[in-house]
Image: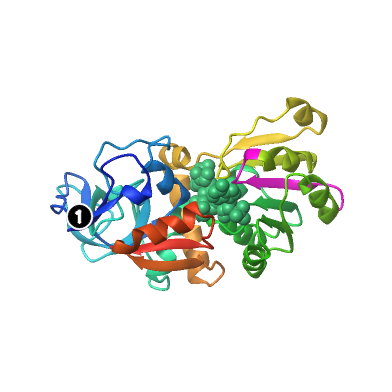
Amino acid sequence: MRALLCTRLEGPEHLEVVERPDPVPGPGQALVRIRLAALNFFDTLIVAGRYQVKPPLPFSPGGEGVGVVEALGEGASGVAVGDRVIVHAGHGCCAERIAIDAAKLTPVPDGVPDEQAAGLTITYGTSLHALANRARLRPGEWMAVLGASGGVGLAAVELGRLMGARVIACASSEEKLAVARAHGAEATLVYDPATLKDALRQVSGGGVDVVYDAVGDAYAEPALRALGWRGRYLVIGFAAGAIPRLPLNLILLKELDVQGVHWGAFLDREPAAHQADQRRLLGWVAEGKLTAQVHGVYPLAEFPEAFGLLTRRAAVGKVLLRP
Ligand SMILES: NC(=O)c1ccc[n+]([C@@H]2O[C@H](COP(=O)([O-])OP(=O)(O)OC[C@H]3O[C@@H](n4cnc5c(N)ncnc54)[C@H](OP(=O)(O)O)[C@@H]3O)[C@@H](O)[C@H]2O)c1
């Protein structure tokens, strides 16, 4: 099979497309032929050795995708040969085939096309977990989303709107904000750490109820300062680079909650709750309530362009690779 391979931890430009033997499904595993792999920001980190998970070399990147079950290992259950499934693997989807625990696969309903299913799990799964299970977002609340046109950010905009919140999308350009508005943002801000706090307070009429922060760095503290009484601050990621330090006095003064979101740990610790979230998301996509926006679909050989979209901050929605 053809696979995109990471043989040294020197970044996306050093990946190679190579021929590899097909994997063989072990006990409890399914062999899935990948139709589309979806990239996330962490794929740019994992191939540079800068992500918390460090798979042994060589490995294929690609945390998630969609494919069809081709064979089952001994004792594998829950899916059948021929089923179209969402694969959430952590890595390994940028290859024609993957062998993976059958229990980690989610069958895809007929109404959901491959393009939408491929990149649904990580971004929408993270954002639904953050908004519903952690922040307990309520209708009518103001929510600021930092990095609102990226993968998890755009999912948060759509889900926030669907849950009845008033969403303020924050991103680096008017072009990106137009996308967030089209996905349900009520207000938009081109963000600048120097003006972010006042701008968010002004738009929300005093202070926002929830901050969804996927960028960190210099944006974090002004966003924290824009929260109102008992606001919740969701720590999602640090796409802008530095991990910020937040002054605890601000948390005391307004009885704020800073809520960590570690979706990967959540799905290992609470698999039933994760499966319920997945079914909820797939139902909403089938009903046309979520778009699962796709930036573009690229053949495996065009991986430099696909990864470059993420490292250059140019992706609007999901970047997909067709192995
Ligand atoms: N906590 C969890 O469980 C969890 C789960 C999934 C992802 N994450 C994290 O969430 C973050 C976003 O992931 P994603 O897949 O949504 O990424 P993405 O699609 O690349 O979006 C990241 C956004 O961050 C903004 N950004 C600001 N400074 C940037 C920089 N220097 N380089 C790149 N982007 C920058 C960009 O928007 P602007 O240009 O508009 O600023 C971009 O749209 C990552 O840190 C990821 O590790 C966390």
Q: Amino acid at mark 1?
A: Val
**Callout 1: few (<14), some (14-19), or many (20+) C-alpha neighbours within 10 Å?**
few
The N terminus appears in which quarter of the rendering? Answer: bottom left
The C terminus appears in which quarter of the rendering? Answer: bottom left
**Front one among 53 and 131:** 53
Residue 168's quadrant in the figure?
bottom right
Residue 172's quadrant in the figure?
bottom right
In the rendered view, how is the structure colored? Answer: rainbow
Residue with the mark numbered 1: 18
Q: Position of residue 113 (x, y in %)?
A: 40, 71
Cβ at disc 1 under 8 Å from ligand 1? no
Q: How many marks?
A: 1
Residue at 43 percent across and 59 percent down: it is 119
Would residue 129 be seen by someone viewing this image from the given angle?
A: no
Residue at 61 percent across and 42 percent down: it is 134
Q: Position of residue 188 (x, y in %)?
A: 73, 61
Magenta residues, start to end? 205-217
Is 167 situated left or right of 207 in this image?
left
Q: Position of residue 43 (x, y in %)?
A: 40, 48
Is 127 situated left or right of 20 in this image?
right
Would residue 12 be seen by someone viewing this image from the given angle?
A: yes
Residue at 48 percent across and 67 percent down: it is 294
| SS class, disc 1 | strand
